[in-house]
């Protein structure tokens, strides 16, 4: 494990409830700049780079190694327990962490990570990995830079472009997901989960129900007008959903113990798609 603080970024009051943000494939911790700025008033916000990405680009990505890195950062920068927010690849990593180290996870937020990368559903993951493999560094940098600058304003795009794009690590990470099921890992986590998807993120919206049923305590929010990058499409609404989720969490002593066996859900998800923002 690295103890170098350059591999993660921290903001907000030191004694505030911590939130740890885990980014998606080919990106870096810079993708969370809007959420860090919005939530640092009341929370200790932490964003980290995963293996194969950003400051950890030289490290091999595996799901276990990535989850262990998140665990390390929670210990190092969040006092040993935090709400964990995972986008896409980061959501899968967060589920693995929550299953293996539930004592570190006060609450879990998943965005764009509610499809099992197995069978036919593995095709988009493998296809994107294939594409990343065939774009050289300069080509990938140019395409990604154009995409983010064309689609988002400078406040969002500039930090992402400065953080760089990591196609080789992203392709490796996507292939590491394929063939593994994550709903059982979510089912093993005894705490509360917020499933937060963009209304236009069709692949993950179609399969969200199985993950909501697997979670011990699930809430669902759908962000209108948002795609897979919901935190960038609707940054204020995404941050507000996290704030409301964290405000509603039980105090630490009321977090339920891990079940000895799968038990029925405590409560159904809110509505069909929860709050529509």
Image: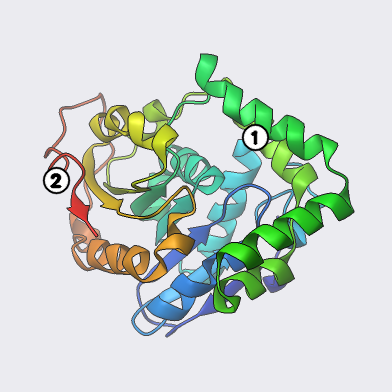
- Sort mark 2 into few (<14), some (14-19) or many (20+) by Cα contacts within 10 Å: few
Residue behind mark 1:
174
* Residue 9 image position (x, y, % from top left): 60, 73
Residue 192 as seen in the image, left or right of residue 12: left
Residue located at (81% from left, 36% from top): 133
80 or 90, which is in the foreground?
90
Q: Which mark, by number, is residue 72?
A: none
Q: Position of residue 271 (x, y in %)?
A: 12, 43
137 with respect to 50 (left or right): right
Residue 248's place in the image compared with 58, above or below, is below
Helix, strand or loop under label 1: helix
Residue 72 falls in image quadrant: bottom right
Q: As displayed, is residue 51 above or below residue 15?
A: above
Q: Which residue is mark 2?
A: 270
Q: Determine the secondary structure under disc 2.
A: loop
Q: CA distance from mark 2 to mark 1?
A: 31 Å
Asked whether residue 31 is in view, the answer is yes
> What's the residue at 61%, 68% (across, down)?
30
């Amino acid at each position: 494990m690295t103890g170098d603080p350059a591999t993660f970024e921290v903001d907000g009051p030191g004694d505030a409830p911590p939130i740890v943000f885990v980014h998606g494939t080919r990106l870096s911790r810079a993708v969370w700049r809007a959420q860090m700025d919005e939530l640092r008033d009341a929370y200790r916000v932490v964003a980290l780079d995963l293996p194969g990405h950003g400051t950890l680009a030289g490290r091999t990505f595996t799901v276990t190694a990535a989850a262990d890195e998140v665990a390390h950062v929670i210990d190092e920068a969040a006092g040993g327990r935090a709400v964990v927010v995972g986008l896409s690849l980061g959501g899968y990593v967060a589920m693995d962490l929550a299953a293996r180290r539930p004592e570190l996870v006060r609450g879990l937020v998943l965005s764009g990570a509610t499809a099992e990368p197995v069978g036919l559903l593995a095709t988009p993951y493998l296809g994107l990995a294939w594409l990343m493999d065939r774009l050289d560094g300069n080509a990938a940098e140019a395409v990604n830079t154009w995409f983010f600058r064309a689609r988002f304003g400078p406040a969002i795009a500039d930090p992402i472009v400065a953080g760089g794009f990591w196609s080789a690590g992203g392709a490796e990470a996507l292939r590491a997901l394929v063939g593994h099921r994550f709903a059982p890992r979510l089912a093993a986590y005894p705490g509360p989960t917020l499933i937060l998807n963009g209304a236009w993120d069709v692949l993950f919206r179609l399969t969200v129900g199985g993950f909501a049923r697997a979670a011990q305590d699930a809430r669902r929010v759908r962000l209108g007008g948002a795609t897979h990058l919901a935190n960038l499409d609707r940054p204020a609404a995404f941050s507000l959903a996290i704030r409301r989720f964290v405000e509603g969490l039980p105090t630490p002593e009321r977090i339920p113990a891990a079940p000895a066996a799968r038990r029925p859900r405590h409560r159904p998800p809110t509505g069909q798609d929860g709050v529509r923002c």
